[in-house]
Image (cartoon, helix red, strand yellow):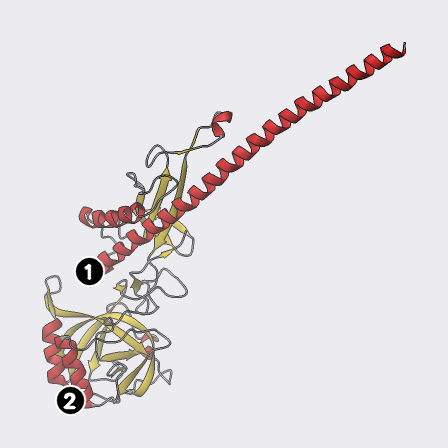
Amino acid sequence: MWNKHRTWGVSALLNQRGIAAINGAFMGLTMAIMAGVAIDVGHALLTQNELHNASDAAALAAARQLGVTYLAMPIAQQQDLNRNLTSAEQSQVNAQATAAANANSASNVSNLSLSQGDIEYGTWDFNGKTFTPTVTRPNAIRATARRDGAANGPITTFFGGILGVSTMNLSTTSIAALGTSGGPTPPGVADVPFAISQNWFNGVASCNSGIQFSPTGANGCAGWHVFDQTPANANKLRNTIDGLQDGSYQSPGLTPGQTHYNFTGGEVSSAFPNLINLWNTKKQWNTDTGRDEWAINLPVYQSSSSSSCNNPSDSIIIVGYAKAVITKVAKNDIQAEVKCDAFFDGAPSPNQTGGGIGPLQPLSVYPRLVS
């Protein structure tokens, strides 16, 4: 009887060990599968990050080319809210996006390609944070980078095949947009030896309204300067104008709120012949308006009084800039028009708004990622 009980005890013990071995094997297999899944998920996340870098690069490169395209247009075309991008202009934008994507890699694909439709044109609403596809005066580019059947092929899993998942499709989308210009400008952008007071924009300025830089006063509210050079006298002004004409002088970069220009304190009659020569060099005939025009980038200086349009003197801070077109330069007679909805070679405003709605809000040709 004792032996029988002993035999049963051994069998039970063996059975328990067998079950434990099966459970251990099952748990080991489960853990191996989980580890494999974790490796595949990690691989997918890493590839997704690489694709995101590629879509960011493609969107920024394309939107930058879009800005360059706008800047090269006559101001009237820049302002045309109903103008469609031509096929040639779109090809240039697409080429930049393709090159930027091709410079990136994702997993085992070293030069990513874009499929048809991966670059979309549209308008970005800075307030509503929405993208509306259109080629009619777009201000944004939406780019997609992918590893799927459409481009670059899906990624291959390491262990997912055990669960019937041998490949994975991945994609990312980025949006870059052109907002308000209000940041720093490169050297050479601010290209005229006069500026306009911020007071002129307090209820006086409107889109396409006329301004005058000579004679100065209420109709111009402007002043003459020699940029950041010293001293601000007649001789320095004449030399500066001559340098702008023959290319021997390049105006410095401008940062609103930081840059100071040195103003002459009045009109300099002796500089008019020099300025007329500069006008004759810069002007271009506009067939639409039937007149000579000189598109300028106009600095805006800070005024010590909220209503004064007196001629400024000494060093004054520059608070912004605007687009304008000079239509006439003669002795004691300089006429121009301020322009809205135009593009400026300046960095985006720190506040990143849509821009283009007023004379002090030109549009930037440098994009930012918005989504």
Up-down relation of residue 356 to residue 324 (above or below): above
Q: As drawn, is 280 to the left or to the right of 195?
A: left
Examine the image and state in which quarter residue 264 appears.
bottom left
Q: As drawn, is 238 to the left or to the right of 223?
A: left
Examine the image and state in which quarter residue 265 appears.
bottom left
Estimate how packed mark 1 is, as few (under 14), some (14 to 19) or many (20 or more) residues with alpha carbons within 10 Å: few
The amino acid type, in three-letter code, at marker 1 is Ala
Q: In this orientation, which residue lies closer to the viewer: 126 or 159?
A: 159
* Residue drawn 47% across the image and 28% down it: 165
Up-down relation of residue 175 to residue 182 (above or below): above
Q: In this orientation, which residue lies closer to the viewer: 6 or 302?
A: 6
Up-down relation of residue 26 to residue 290 (above or below): above
* Residue drawn 43% across the image and 53% down it: 128
Q: Residue extending furthest right?
A: 1
The amino acid type, in three-letter code, at marker 2 is Ser
> Which quadrant: the N terminus?
top right
Q: In this orientation, which residue lies closer to the viewer: 202 or 304?
A: 304
Instruction: Name the residue tied to disc 1.
Output: 72
